[in-house]
């Protein structure tokens, strides 16, 4: 099977990485396909199974862990498991496309360690923790408790930024989108041997 490249976007929840990833996916010349993660968290709003996530029960998720079906997995928040299935990356490579991931910092770094040459690991940095809180509240998808849980985790995640290949500061979305496009495009076109 021909292997493509792996483009990882990681950031604290609410940093805007999903917006950046969606923007890149629309640029057909980049030939990217979104890695649909598996998760045991509940479906939110308009989310669709098999499009946004593969929604599994905690029991199903744990069986897959036991069967070594994951490239990486994390209990990102208590009782909420998230992971990248090996079959997902294989599916995308079989399409002749590059994989783009929207995953947490530990998962992102794990993929970088497993495929150091093939992976571009990008950290998206929010302007500040206060701004992050405002964005999460505006999004109105989580309860106050869940927002606090995400904020508590964000501080620890920010400390991992230097471990990534590159950091994008998302204080101005237009600028961040352009920067992300250039980085990904350069990385994909850098060499054609993988
Ligand atoms: P959300 O619940 O907001 O969709 O995602 C919560 C966090 O889990 C986000 O930081 C998201 O990037 C991360 N996440 C989503 N999929 C995966 C995955 O497959 N592996 C890991 N490690 N984290 C993931």
Image: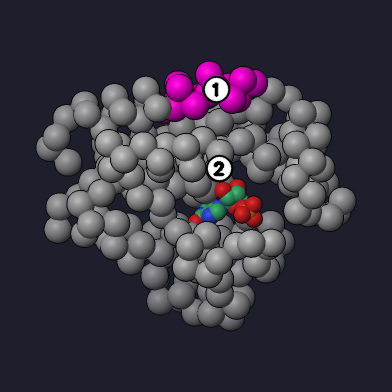
Q: Which residue is mark 1?
A: 174
* Quadrant in which the N terminus is drawn: bottom left
Residue 69 in percent (x, y) is at 39, 70
Asked which secondary structure carries label 1, the reply is helix
Q: Which mark is residue 18?
A: 2
Which of marks 2 and 1 precedes in the sequence? Answer: 2
Badge 1 local density, few (<14 within 10 Å), some, or many (20+)? few
Residue 80 in view here: no
* In magenta stretch: residue 172: yes
- Say above or below: 109 vs 183: below
Residue 58 in view here: yes
- Say above or below: 92 vs 116: below
Badge 2 local density, few (<14 within 10 Å), some, or many (20+)? some
Q: Is mark 2 within 8 Å of ligand 1?
A: yes
- Range shown magenta: 165-180
Q: Nearer the viewer, mark 1 or mark 2?
A: 1
* Quadrant in which the C terminus is drawn: top left
Residue drawn at 25 percent across, 49 percent down: 97
- Say above or below: 183 vs 72: above
On the picture, is 58 further left or further right than 176?
Answer: right
């Amino acid at each position: 099977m021909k292997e493509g490249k792996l483009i990882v976007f990681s950031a604290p929840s609410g940093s805007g990485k999903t917006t950046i990833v969606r923007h890149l996916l629309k640029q057909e010349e980049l030939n990217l396909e979104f890695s649909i993660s598996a998760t045991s968290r509940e479906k939110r709003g308009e989310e669709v199974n098999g499009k946004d996530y593969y929604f599994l029960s905690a029991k199903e998720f744990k069986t897959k862990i036991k069967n070594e079906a994951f490239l990486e997995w994390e209990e990102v928040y208590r009782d909420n498991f998230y992971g990248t299935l090996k079959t997902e990356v294989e599916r995308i490579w079989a399409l002749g496309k590059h994989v783009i991931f929207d995953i947490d910092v530990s998962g992102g770094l794990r993929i970088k360690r497993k495929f150091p040459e093939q992976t571009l690991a990008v950290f998206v940095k929010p302007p500040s923790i206060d701004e992050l809180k405002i964005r999460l509240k505006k999004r109105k998808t989580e309860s106050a408790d869940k927002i606090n849980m995400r904020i508590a985790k964000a501080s620890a995640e920010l400390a991992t930024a230097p471990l990534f290949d590159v950091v994008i500061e998302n204080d101005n979305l237009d600028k961040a989108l352009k920067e992300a496009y250039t980085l990904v495009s350069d990385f994909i076109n850098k060499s054609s041997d993988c």
